Image (tube, rainbow, N blue to C red):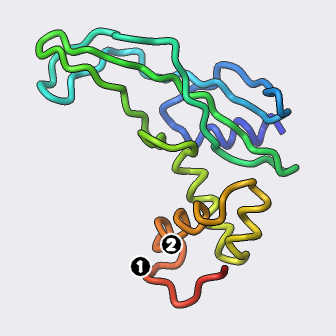
């Protein structure tokens, strides 16, 4: 299982694994840290910035392991403040959405599952609302099917 965790986390190329543990519900949680240790530049004026806030994390669904358990990833929330224009912002990570509870990789994998199975089946297996599964499928369908509008949708 450890190999599967490492392989799955490798999809998040800008992070290194810091710790792997289980949460209260026996789900695997992987704490990651960014590989990049350099300073971050202001998105407005592109000048240097200072660390404004560290220590907070977001917990996102990232994958599911062979026995059906969800693999969670604990991603740091870095807040920065520009030294020139005083703009405060959150550092964006590749593959991590600004909002939501799942990584892009997880959403694509769920959409992939919907090609052969119904939204309801996938939603039950992953303990997700079927409307969420349908929305993710519609958002990523052209990646899997090659077309923008589906001819047939499994419900």
Q: Is residue 86 above or below residue 71?
A: above
Nearest the viewer among 134 and 21 is: 134
At horizontal 29% and vertical 20% (from top left) the residue drawn is 40
Position of the N terminus by quadrant = top right
At horizontal 70% and vertical 20% (from top left) the residue drawn is 19
Q: Are marks 2 and 1 in contact (CB under 8 Å)?
A: yes
Residue 106 numbered mark, or none: none
Give the image location of residue 31, x and y in percent: 64, 24
Q: Is residue 116 above or below residue 87?
A: below
Residues at marks 2 and 1, CA–CA distance in whole angstroms = 7 Å
Q: Quadrant of residue 130?
A: bottom right
Residue 94 appears left or right of 67:
left
Classify mark 1: residues with Cα within 10 Å, few (<14), some (14-19) or many (20+): few
Classify mark 2: residues with Cα within 10 Å, few (<14), some (14-19) or many (20+): many
Position of the C terminus by quadrant = bottom right
Give the image location of residue 61, x and y in percent: 64, 42
Residue 148 numbered mark, or none: 1
At horizontal 79% and vertical 27% (from top left) the residue drawn is 23
Nearest the viewer among 132 and 26 is: 132
> Could you say whether the residue bearing mark 2 is in a helix, strand or loop?
helix
> Could you say whether the residue bearing mark 1 is in a helix, strand or loop?
loop
Give the image location of residue 126, x and y in percent: 75, 55
Give the image location of residue 55, x and y in percent: 51, 12
Pointer 2: what residue?
141
Residue 144 appears left or right of 73:
left
């Amino acid at each position: 299982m450890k190999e599967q965790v490492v392989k799955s986390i490798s999809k998040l190329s800008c992070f290194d694994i810091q710790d792997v543990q289980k949460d209260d519900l026996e789900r695997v949680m992987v704490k990651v840290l960014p590989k990049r240790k350099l300073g971050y530049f202001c998105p407005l004026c592109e000048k240097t910035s200072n660390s404004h806030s560290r220590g907070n994390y977001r917990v996102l669904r990232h994958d599911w392991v062979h026995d059906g358990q969800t693999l969670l990833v604990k991603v740091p929330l870095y807040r920065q403040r520009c030294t020139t224009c005083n703009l405060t912002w959150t550092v964006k990570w590749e593959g991590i959405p600004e909002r939501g509870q799942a990584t892009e990789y997880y959403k694509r994998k769920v959409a992939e599952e919907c090609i052969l199975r119904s939204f309801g089946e996938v939603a039950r297996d992953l303990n997700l609302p079927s409307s969420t599964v349908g929305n993710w499928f519609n958002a990523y369908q052209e990646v899997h099917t090659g077309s923008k509008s589906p001819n047939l949708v499994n419900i």
